[in-house]
Image (spheres, rainbow, N blue to C red):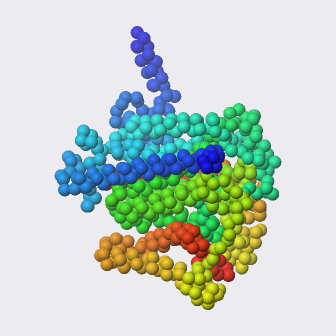
Amino acid sequence: MWHNIFKIASKPDNIPIVGMLLLVFFFWFLSFWAAFKNDRIRRAAAGKPRPEGGKSKGDVVDVIDFMYPEEEQGLPKKVSCWPHLVKLEFICAIAVMALLMFWSIPIDAPLEEPSDSTLTPNPSKAPWYFLGLQDMLVYFDPWIAGVLLPTFIIVGLMVIPYVDVNPKGNGYYTFAERPFAILVYWFGFFVLWVLEIVIGTFCRGPGWMFFWPGQEWDPHRVVAEVNINWNEFLANISGITALKSETAGLLLGIVTILAYFGLGMAVPYLWLRRQESSIIYRLGLIRYCVVGFFFWTMMTLPIKIVLRLMFSIKYILVTPWFNI
Amino acid sequence: MLTEQREKIKEIVTESQVYKSIFRRGFEDTTKNRVLAIFGNVFLHLHPPYVKRHALKFTHSWCMGGITFLLFLVLCFTGVFLCFYYHPDKINAYRDMKYFEYDVPFGVVLRNMHRWAAHLMVITVWLHMTRVFMTGSYKPPREFNWVVGVFLLVLTLLLSFTGYLLTDDQLGFWAVTVGTNMARATPLLGHEGPFGEQLGVTAYNDIRFALLGGSVVGGNALLRAYVWHCVAMPVTAILFLAVHFWRTRKDGGTAGPL
Ligand code: HEM
């Protein structure tokens, strides 16, 4: 059982993945620890007079005044960069260089047989940092998994500063002041990106079939292809065979996708209006739609994973030119 | 007596024209000299003269941006040495790898360092982005610097990816084949993508052909990967890095609570 896991993990090019997991867990812990600590400090400080020299702007409490132990509070907030920062950078550089040396001496960069276009390895995998994208090919056609969604990831990251209108949490760790932003970030980064890489590395064997970690990779394993499309699935459960036709597939697909995005955007909008939440006014319609679009596009991945694994559904929309 | 002589030598050195032309400040620990140390140095002046005290803590910035930059420098340095021995053609590329292994002095360590620093940089870039997100440092006035950062993220991944092919072994070859096969499916521009066929796009004029300089991953693809990897993308990355650091500084240094 452990043999197979170890065999994959100890491939020189996969060692970084193990390192990445440890680092991600560590910094996850560190950032949430800092966030909860700041939140606690701010809650305790609410209502209390600010320490000497402290200031606050609007409703943003100046956490920094509370972040330092008493004896440091009187010290200046800024220090000269030379030597304080430069010294730390120097120490940090030495530590990283030492790590890199110790890594580079015993562990050799992989070099396999000379390239041969007639000898296809099975499975053939992209570099590990792209395995998340490659694994999406299971759930989406290549033009979506390989082109559209990566573009959306890049553009989606770029719009973050322009759609996050929450003025709080600018420059310090906090969870309570921006829970939605932080949860979405970690869902996208950790669940969808990092975990997909782990699955792509450890669970995808020959023919890109799924193997549990530790299961021997048997290239001859037969998996019955029972995948059906959305309209066929509806036809099966409702018993209306007419739904199985191509036109019905096309129409149902379009309706489903429109309903998905439409409801996905309308329901939270109406709900927030009813709550008389100020978020909706601060966002404005355009920002709201951009957030909604990227959020629900991101959620298509977990949704398609669940649909595939639980109901063997392959496509939602089937057209002669492309399938979704 | 001795101290006197030492002082005299020191004076001769520090008062000499050569010394003064290089170092334009004294060594006394004064505020002025501290600021001059930053301003008078083209590399250090990417820093602001003063930093917020909380930003010095490891728990705030994780040093991740700095570590990423250090790894970038390591990659440039080791990359130059690798370039001295490497030929980007189908006949020599793989042999050069063996040459590094058996002949080039410190060739193995050189290659290993380049490889591991590249992998590590991919990880640290993600962590740096995570830390910037978690401290909300992309919020006004730093929106644009975040966007510049996203470009750097993409460049880092592409640098790593183009480098993967250069060994010309099975690992790199198939990884790049799998990766570039996705380009076939580009809508409109790929010959297997939606509406590609209808627009007359074939395997010989689509976007994948442009990337590879051919319809298969061959000698031309190796050369293109080499030029992207060793010239075009590092230069682009340096430009974006310059903007990135400049903006970090102009936007008031590493973000802190208001
Ligand atoms: C080649 C990659 C990169 C390098 C070398 C780099 C380097 C740096 C450095 C040295 C800093 C100073 C503060 C610190 O160390 O945290 C910084 C700040 C910053 N970086 Fe990057 N960075 C890179 C990629 C990115 C990416 C991918 C993003 C986000 C998508 C990003 C967004 C930012 C922002 C917004 C700041 C300002 C943070 C603040 O004011 O606290 N950078 N970067």
Q: From what the image shows, is residue B62 above or below residue A212?
A: above
Left or right placement of residue B106 versus residue B218 in this view: left
> In the image, A313: left or right of B83?
left
Q: Is residue B249 visible?
A: no
Which residue is drawn at the image coordinates 38% and 43% (left, top)? B57
Q: Spot the residue most to the top.
A: B1
Question: Which of these two is toward me, A3 or A169?
Answer: A3
Q: Quadrant of residue A210?
A: bottom right
Image quadrant containing the C terminus of chain A: bottom right
Say if residue A246 shows up in the picture.
Answer: yes
Above or below, comparing residue B194 to residue B87 in the picture? below
Whether residue A318 is situated above or below residue B211 in the rendered picture: below
Q: Nearer the viewer, residue B115 or B154?
A: B115
Residue at left offset 61%, top offset 62% = A135
Q: Position of residue B237 (x, y in %)?
A: 57, 52
Q: Quadrant of residue A322?
A: bottom right
Q: Position of residue B101 (x, y in %)?
A: 73, 37
Depth order, front residue of B141/B93: B93
Q: Residue at x 78, y 48 (%)?
A: A114
- Image coordinates of residue A45 in percent, x first then y, are 23, 53
**How many numbered discs?**
0
Question: Is residue A105 found left or right of B200 in the rendered image?
Answer: left
Q: Is residue A53 left or right of residue B183?
A: left
Residue at left 71%, top 32%? B105
